[in-house]
Image (tube, grey):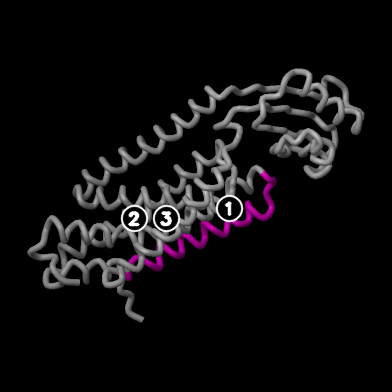
Amino acid sequence: MKLEIIKNNKRWYLISSVIIIIGLTFGFLGGFDLGIDFTGGTMMHIDMEQHVSVDEIRNITHKYDLNESIVHIGADKNEIMLKTKQSLSNEERTEIYNDISQKYNLEKENLLAVGQFGPSIGDETKKKAVISVLIASLGMLVYIALRFEIIFAMAAVIALLHDILMMIAFYGLFRIPINGPFIAAILITVGYSINDTIVVFDRVRENVEIVKKKKYGEIVDMSIRQTISRSINTSVTTLLAIICLYIFGVQSIKEFTLPLIAGIVSGTYSSIFIASPIWYNLNMIFNKPRYVGK
């Protein structure tokens, strides 16, 4: 079957737009689930001296209505990290720990650490997250502009913006907590996506120099056909490893790998169906004489 990306470019734009709009709508109407890193709150690190399931801990703390996050840490998973968005007083923390310690015969020394995070730290985290993404995007823009040309760079950055919006929409749609790993997942997705996009763009540039009689729409389709198996194979092998982490990992790993799976799928999709058509559309605007027609 002949793959015609440019001819159906509006279809790809529509698919992405619908997914992003639905996800962002769910997120803004229902409220994004901001984690403790962004909202501030309380953290309690407890050595349980044995492996205790998250459900058992929640059976003890449910009466406090904390809406807490509980994860296992340590080599033997005998320690738990309890995080809540609420800023608990010393009396409240003591009462919660007493309930847990009575159930499992713990001593005061088993409470390894207690942390209180104010909203100012949350605001600082948000600021650093935005700055990190902006610096990464700017660096990629400069790199691609120097290696290729400015239109390639513009198309790549627009595709990266698409991937970031897809990730945020995914978080909003499935109510995944937005916390520290969110920043890492965004940056990994951006890096993975730009790598795929550069592979396609590199082939487009080569074909533009070699094939003189074809229009650029045809060259883009030809370049994608030549690289699509590489993109898909690389993504599938990466996804297999991440899916294994999601299946066998603890809750904190699941919260990181699930959006990462969505990000890699989105990055692969955008490098094939978004970045190249955008590059073509930009050339239709700035280089009309040769680029007219598909």
Q: Nearer the viewer, residue 3 or 30?
A: 30
**Which badge, 2 or 3, comes first in the chain's sequence?**
2
C-beta proximity under 8 Å, tags 2 and 1:
no
Q: Amino acid at mark 2?
A: Thr
What's the residue at 72%, 33% (across, down)? 82
Magenta span of residues: 225-251
Q: Residue 174: which numbered mark, if any?
A: 1
Is residue 289 rendered to the left or right of residue 169? left
How many marks overall? 3
Looking at the rendered image, the disc whose residue lies closer to the viewer, 2 or 3, is 3
Is residue 104 rendered to the left or right of residue 131? right
Q: Residue 197: which numbered mark, if any?
A: 2
Q: Main secondary structure of the magenta part?
A: helix
Work out whether 144 lies above or below 238.
above
Instruction: Please say whether residue 226 is visible from this viewpoint.
Output: no
What is the C-alpha distance between the residues marked 2 and 1? 27 Å
Residue tagged 3: 267
